[in-house]
Image (cartoon, helix red, strand yellow):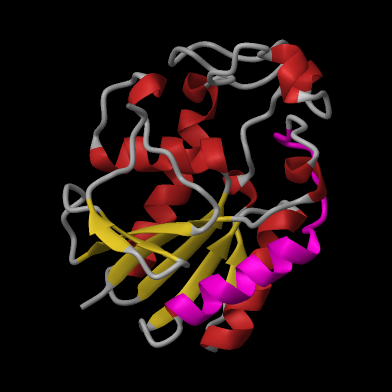
Amino acid sequence: MSALYIARHQETEANREELVLGASDSPLTDEGRKGALQLSRMLRGRGIALIISSPLRRAEATARVIAEICGAPFSIDGDYGELSCGSWEGRPRREILPAGGPLRSAWADAPPGGESFEDAAGRIARVLERALFYRKRHTVLMVGHGAANQLLLALFMGLDRDPHRFPLQPSSLVYFFEGFSPLKAKWLDAGGASGEGLVVPQ
């Protein structure tokens, strides 16, 4: 039975420094490379036949490690990059959102000069369409980003357009769907935990 797996890139220098990182890029840290190895070991033996990666190097580096250990080819989808954060990119998150909270509080909300979920929906829908085409016969792993994966899951599962209810995805967690139902989400964690459903804000 084919399946669709959705993973997030591992820790970067910018993540560690708590900087806003959207369409700009940052290399993986040593912990990030270790995280990619952990994901690879968790995913090995699950029949992954194709890996689709964001073009940003933090996702590509994660995908390359998984591809090597799982013995699967990978391709880069130019539409699968993270949502742009405009003039907020590279700035400390605490300066922009001192009380915490999401970078986008509504479907059409966007950082100054950046993308909203609405803006990015068309390109992420194209990514999903191509992935589902391959998934008809093969198990596919997608390696993307926080907001891009939230949007991809929202489109695939037909979720309400409320970012406050979009699924969370720590870098250690992989969502997957067996068969062809978009309603039966499951997840695996590199720490060994697993479960069903989406992890959402409380």
Quadrant assignment for the N terminus: bottom left
Percent from the top left, x then y, of residue 133? 35, 62
49 shown above or below 7: below
Residue beneath the point at 73% across and 29% down? 20
**26 inside magenta stretch:** yes
User: Position of 70 compared to 65: left or right?
Assistant: left
Using the image as rendered, state which of residue 146 and residue 33 is in the foreground. Answer: 33
Using the image as rendered, state which of residue 39 and residue 49 is in the foreground. Answer: 39
Residue beneath the point at 45% across and 84% down? 44
Percent from the top left, x then y, of residue 74? 59, 73
178 shown above or below 160: below
Question: Residue 151 appears in which quarter of the rendering?
Answer: top left
Percent from the top left, x then y, of residue 146? 55, 41
User: Position of 75 compared to 4: left or right?
Assistant: right
**24 inside magenta stretch:** yes
Question: Residue 16 appears in which quarter of the rendering?
Answer: top right
Quadrant assignment for the C terminus: top left
User: Position of 182 compared to 13: left or right?
Assistant: left
User: Position of 90 compared to 98: left or right?
Assistant: right
Residue beneath the point at 77% across and 32% down? 19
Residue range of the region highlighted in magenta in the rendering: 21-42
